[in-house]
Amino acid sequence: MNNQPLLEAKEITKAFGGIMALNRVSFTVNAGEILGIIGPNGSGKTTIVNCLTGFIKMTSGHVFFRGRDISKKPPHKIADMGLTRTFQIMRPYYSLPAYKNLVIPLFSPRAKRTGGWRGGGRLGDRNTVGIDILEEIGFERDSYVPYKTASTLPTGYLKRLELARCLALKPEVIICDEIFSGLSMSEIASMVPLIERLQMEGITLIMIEHRLRELFRVANRVMVLNFGEKLIEGHPKEVMADERVKEAYFGSQNMAEVMMHA
Amino acid sequence: MDILIYGTINSVALALYALGFAMVYGVSRLPNFAHGALYVLSGFITWTMLNSLGLPYIVSIVLTLIITGIIGAMIYQFVLIRVRGMEISEIIASYAIGLAILEGLRWGGFRGVNYTLPAFIAGSTNIAGISVDYQRLLVVAIGAAVVAVLWLFTHYTRIGLALRGMAQDERAAMMLGIDSDLMAVVAMGFGSMLAALAAILLLPLGNVVVEAGYNVLILAIAVCIVGGLGSWMGAVLAAFLIGFAQILTVVYLGAQYQMVVAIFAIILTLILKPSGIFGQQKELEERV
Amino acid sequence: MAITTQRRKERIDRGINVRTEGIYALMSIKELSYLAAPRLVLIVGLLILPLLLPDMYWKRVITITCIYAFLALSFDFLAHFVGLVSLGGAFFVGIGGYLAAIANTYWGFPPWLTIPFAALVGGAVCTLLLFPCLPLRGVYFAIVSLMYPLFSARVIEALDIFGGTDGIMGIDGFSNHFVEEYAPLGLLLIALFAIRRLVTTDFGLVLRGVKDNDQAIRASGMNVTFYKSVAVYIASTMGCLSGAILVHIYMWSGISLFALDFSILPIAATVIGGSGTLIGPVLGCFILVPISELLRDFGTLRIVFYALILVGFIIFRSEGLMVWGQRKYHQFERWTQI
């Protein structure tokens, strides 16, 4: 029947020169869940995102999205299928106002197909849809913020803009690459409900994170990477309790202690 | 056999064209489009000293090297440093300077076949039945020496190490107290001297003509792109690849295709492996 | 602590009172004319220019200026709205010129047919030939595009096709002077306003997105190479158009169509006029080309001349005349004490 996972990675391997960034990593993501991927610095988290979304070609392995092999597809084809990503280093269109940043993804073939909005090219329409999406994601509609040039926006808004750019495509999966990092505690606190709402709306999320506490709150399952290899995968509580994770992630320190600082 | 000998000579010549360009690009990420112009300019400086001022050959050579180095450094210090980091402006500005030098020389009357530099050592010898003149052998010998000296220079002297540091990571180098602007000027000076050295070695083989400036620029860029921009060893290797390819085309297709080879090599490289043979891995992360 | 009086320059917008970014509420004729005047001055000025010049020679100069203006427009569009710095404007001229020449002499097309033919087909040819290089960015694209015209000239020389070094002769000229003067001017104005409109549409926004951040375009499910090739098609169509017109004016087509002039002068004009303004480059051409004609007696010294102007502008006034002019028009400055 239909218990096929939404996204399935089979033995993804990526070597940069002689360095193994990813070594035979396999995992699955089911529709509607939130999968967290954690790991120390340099454990290959961002490389996974890049491999899944086609931004770098993996050395070997396969990725199946809705049962179709997407491992050889270019990034724009993958995004067009509904597997979208944010960037760890935020990449807005700096010279454009925030809402115009959304007009661009709204112009994409996928947005034209999936967008519920009318018209197919009238200028005003995309601007309003863009502002609608921004409001949904936490830009105050009546303030000047949505109209400000992206280069003048603070980090919190830029992270939201990254997410909004994915939402413009009406995606099935969003891969968030460290969406919490660089944010203040209050900004994170306002971001968490947003993530939960996206899940309620039926969007599957993969979250690459350093912020463990917040991640463990929202994630259904967590996968731990270390030196490009999968250590363990399971419920956040199991993962937190696992000795190997503590070893890899925190050295010999007490995990709870580190989490206080996280 | 003649393919081997002339291929080697041609390759060393290409390497000499390219080293200066590669050095400047490697250190300061400046594609010095005035490189060909500096090459021709130094040829004319030498000629002027020899014939108009009547200086001895060796003195004019040394003076030319110094003067060209200073000119290159000044171009950087007074013009290019102001557009540092703005890729488009750097290209346009250096290209414009090169044009101004070359077309200025052309206007100044340096045209035609009247301008030649004498060979260092006249005469020729036989290698495996093929006559090769001494100047060409000298080119190969000095070319090899230049590569060796450059290697020693960048591995064992303070300035050389600083230059290499800049080439690898400019910010880290600045944190270690390396004056990156000064080093870029120095690199440009050395790069220009390398252009002048190439000119002094190679120009005696033919006439000093303005058109050579454009050809040298294209060849230098071709070699550097094929070898990987900024990689000196890549440039040397690529010089041999293109050098032999050129000689083979000349022998089997005709001399008019010689230039086409270089351009074809660039386009092929850029399509197949844009970072060049020895270029660093240029995937997503690096292109941020 | 000693208090020194310091002064700073204050810039105040003038003109229309009721406005938000890009949207004006016109309240009076004065405000309407404030907006319309610069545009009218440009259009009317260009249109009456040939009438003011009595001399055939200077009328010809205006036409040549238009040809360079097309190239400058195409350079500015590609460089500042798509992020592709093309140093090979001559390539477009050459392809367009040769196509028009071939269509005219070999197939007997009349000029009114060869010019659109050369523009549209030439644009496609250029796009196709540049297509392998489109994934390249920055320096790489600039270098390769510089190679293309040199390459083409060498190929024509080496293979001795299309008349080899002699070129193609016996091309029809324009039927009358009026057409020769106004066709390029009219087309230039149309192209100028069309491109200005294009870059503000959603499609134009995507192109600007390609320049800002091509990875994000990819992540949004759009094919960057496709958008780049459309932009190159638009730019090369303009370049080929100018080449075709040029061939019919000179009634000759040769490898000098691939000459450096066509690559470097439009760039200089763009830098002087103000890059990214689209109108600036056109005005830059109307400044540079006539000056360069005046200096024709000095031979190659004029190349030196505009190379130096170019360097000077890049260093000392990189914003260009147009940006400066716009600022002066829209704002006034005054000194205020701090």
Image (cartoon, rainbow, N blue to C red):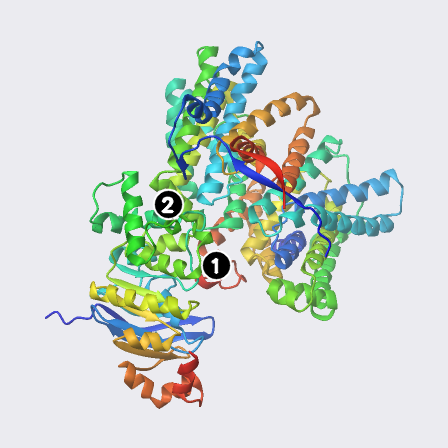
Q: Quadrant of residue A7?
A: bottom left
Q: Secondary structure at mark 1?
A: helix
Q: Are marks 2 and 1 on the same chain?
A: no
Q: Which residue is mark 1?
A: B287
Between residue B28 and residue B136, name the one nearer to us: B28
Between residue C48 and residue A134, name the one nearer to us: A134
Within-10-Å neighbours for mark 2: few <14, some 14–19, many 20+:
many
Q: Is residue C1 above or below residue B199?
A: below
Do tag 2 and tag 1 residues touch (Cβ < 8 Å)? Answer: no
Q: Residue, x 69% and y 29% (percent of image)?
A: C301
Chain of the residue where label 2 is placed in the rendered structure: C
Q: Residue, x 37% and y 26% (percent of image)?
A: C117
Q: Amino acid at mark 2?
A: Val
> Which label is found at residue C152?
none
Q: Which residue is mark 2?
A: C206
Q: Along the horizontal axis of the image, is B216 left or right of B56?
A: left
Q: Quadrant of residue A91?
A: bottom left
Q: Which mark's residue is nearer the viewer, 2 or 1?
A: 2
Q: Amino acid at mark 1?
A: Arg
Residue B223 percent location from the top left of the image: 58, 53
Q: Along the horizontal axis of the image, is B6 left or right of C95?
A: right
Chain of the residue where label 1 is placed in the rendered structure: B
Between residue B174 and residue B51, name the one nearer to us: B174
Instruction: Please indicate, yes or no, whether residue A40 appears anywhere in the rendered image.
Output: yes
